[in-house]
Image (cartoon, rainbow, N blue to C red):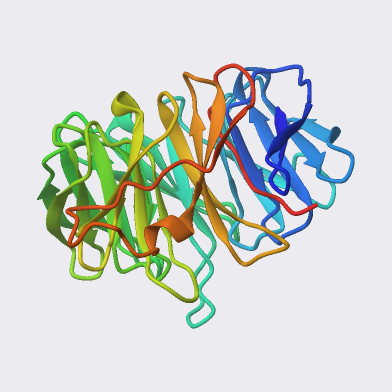
Amino acid sequence: MAAVDLEHFRLRRQIPLDGAPTAVVTHPKGDPAVYVLAPDAGTVYEIHSGNLAVGRRVKAGNQAISMLPSPSGDALWVLYRDPASLVEIPLKTMQAGKRIPLRPSAESFDVTQPDPDHPVDPMAVVCCPKDKLVVIASFRDNTQRTVPLEVQPDLACFRKDGQLVMASSRADRTMTIVDVPTGRTVVHLPLPIAPSYQITSAQGGMLFLTGQGVDGVVIVFPYSTEVWQTVLAGHGPGPMLLWEPLTGPNYLIVTNPSSNSVTVLDPDTTKLVAVIGVGESPCQVLMAGGKRTEEQFMLAVNEKSGDLAVVRMLALTEPQLTSKPRFRSASLFTMIPVGESPVSAAVVAM
């Protein structure tokens, strides 16, 4: 793990682990800690920003796949391949808690998101592509039920109200929308891409998908259960970030690994805002704000070049010298070397 100082834009420390990390998430309730998953070691590490060292760790299986914060924000849920299960890691104890056994074909999962306006049951949906089904598991009572599909689901997510699951298939280029209470299929939507990445808006009204097939982002309306449109988003679009600040415009930032750039779109108008060259093979983008100023920075994790590209978001709103440009071409603020093949990052306060 590499710790980067975003006040002075420099590498602070390399933190050794005993397994290769693939994912890092912040503490769900804002504590100054991050949690790192090393799948082949089956281990989750806790790293505090104060001492930049590994503290507690937990190994709840032999091989993991992915992890997400719990809907309540007091635990992590880790999807394990060996043994096939969802395991709760309470952050208070950092010891394995509840365990939900799964089929060996489980490959990905999502959890419901808390809604302050409407109560949503804490649940997970697990994709089992080889068995052509999804599993809907309740965190409240550890029960689960299987929902058979006609296709192989690779990605799935809940609608914000927890009433629908949207399961996407790469092989069939389709999205199957399932009613959670009954398990019945609501609609089967064709997609112009083989979906690999997804992200939803904060209010849950828009779902964005990227994948092979079209150089664009597919926009789905979860509440009207329809594909709205496909918007061009650079060459070979990959992972995305939807930035929705309290004030100012929203931005959908799409990585383009094959062209070493990111494409910035206005998600409300679907217009192209900017194309920004970053390092080689960007695989993740995230936002950070400085303590001394209110300025926001976009960070691009570049897997091939092993660095972190920093872009001032102010560059997207500054007046342009040319009149009516087709799009903005914001320049890099700085590049920070972080080590070989970075694949994930998170921003945490000191």
Q: Nearer the viewer, residue 330 or 69?
A: 330
Of all residues, the one furthest to the bottom in this rendering is 117
Residue 256 location (% of width, % of height)? 31, 34
In the image, is residue 157 above or below residue 302? below
In the image, is residue 118 above or below residue 48? below
Q: Nearer the viewer, residue 160 or 135?
A: 160
Residue 302 location (% of width, % of height)? 48, 28
Q: Residue at 49% x, 83% y: name it.
A: 117
Q: Residue at 72% x, 61% y: name it.
A: 291
Describe residue 174's horizontal placement relative to residue 95 as left or right.
left
Q: How many marks?
A: 0
Quarter of the image with the N terminus in it: top right
Q: Is any part of residue 185 visible from this angle?
A: no
Q: Is any part of residue 5 visible from this angle?
A: yes
Q: Nearer the viewer, residue 188 or 73?
A: 73
Residue 339 location (% of width, % of height)? 63, 20
Describe residue 18's horizontal placement relative to residue 222 as left or right.
right
Q: Where on the picture, by quarter, is residue 64?
A: top right
Q: Residue at 18% x, 63% y: name it.
A: 225
Q: Nearer the viewer, residue 69 or 149?
A: 69
Describe residue 319's horizontal placement relative to residue 12 as left or right.
left
Residue 36 location (% of width, % of height)? 68, 34
Q: Residue at 11% x, 41% y: name it.
A: 192
